[in-house]
Image (cartoon, helix red, strand yellow):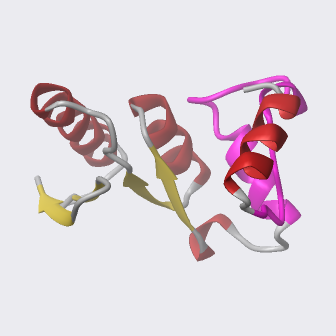
Amino acid sequence: MPRTYAERGLEITNLRAEVLVAYHDTPRHRPHPEPVIMAVRGLELNPQEILFIGDCPTDIKAGKRAGAFTGAAMWGANREERARILDECARVLKENGARKVYVLAISRAYINTVQR
């Protein structure tokens, strides 16, 4: 998302971001870990110190490739789409050496932790 759109979204929702990494801020984009790493460095942290939440498989791949704890936000997804995303998250995490995979699923109404 271009920086102007992201900044406007933050303004409309009255949210504040200590670090904002927009689409044009890095030459490589998700699923490459560069945007995640840039944000983590901006916070003066290491990837192992953050929980990175994404809402699509490329976000999950980027978070894991950066070395961050990674969760999946599930708002707006229908049941079939949620199942597909959770399966993809589990596959990506297992490819990266996870024995057990926990995916945080979030919607406006509930929060679940799903083991896959």
Image location of residue 103, percent across then percent down: 26, 57
In this rendered view, identify the residue nearer to me: 110 or 62: 110
In this rendered view, identify the residue nearer to me: 11 or 110: 11
Taking the image as shown, residue 28 lies to the left or right of residue 110, namely: right
Name the residue rendered at 59%, 70% in the picture. 50
Magenta stretch bounds: 16-42
Q: Is residue 78 magenta?
A: no
Q: Quadrant of residue 77?
A: top left
Name the residue rendered at 29%, 41% in the picture. 89
Asked if 62 appears above or below 46 in the picture, the reply is: above
Image location of residue 108, percent across then percent down: 32, 55
Taking the image as shown, residue 100 lies to the left or right of residue 49, namely: left
Asked if 36 appears above or below 101 in the picture, the reply is: above
Quarter occupied by the N terminus: top right
Taking the image as shown, residue 57 lies to the left or right of residue 64, namely: left
Q: Is residue 22 magenta?
A: yes
